[in-house]
Image: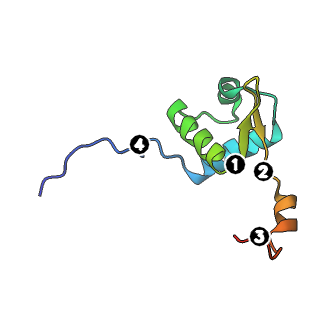
Amino acid sequence: MKLMNKKSEFARSPTLQTVLMVERFIEENSGEFKKTELFNNLPKKVMWQTFQVIMAYLEGINKIVYDKEGYVVYIWNPALYEKVKNRPAIRL
């Protein structure tokens, strides 16, 4: 059986370490950079396509948003999560 050389849709899948590095950087610099500026100021180099995947992921799980001027803002609040997670009205 011959395998086909096909580009995977996950060709730019980031490692967990890279996702966490980007997330920490955003958290520490929330509201200071727009997307491209953020990319250019990361502590380690990341490919643009990989960065795009990470940003889409963080936005999809509601950890970041973009303000009306395009700045990246970190919105995840672990303290609030801890307060509400055990409430009977909350189902996780």
- Secondary structure at badge 3 equals loop
| Distance between mark 1 and mark 4 Cα atoms | 24 Å
Are circles 1 and 4 on residues that touch, CB within 8 Å? Answer: no
Q: Which residue is mark 3?
A: 90
Instruction: Identify the residue shown where x is 77% and y is 70%.
Output: 90
Q: Amino acid at mark 2?
A: Trp
Q: Which residue is mark 4?
A: 11
| Distance between mark 3 and mark 2 Cα atoms | 17 Å
Q: How many marks?
A: 4
Q: Which residue is mark 1?
A: 62
Disc nearer the start of the sequence (4/3) = 4
Instruction: Identify the residue shown where x is 72% and y is 25%.
Output: 70
Q: Amino acid at mark 4?
A: Ala
Disc nearer the start of the sequence (3/2) = 2
Q: Amino acid at mark 3?
A: Ile
Mark 1 vs mark 4: in front: 1
Number of residues whose C-alpha sits closer than 10 Å to that of mark 1, classed few (under 14), some (14–19) or many (20 or more): few
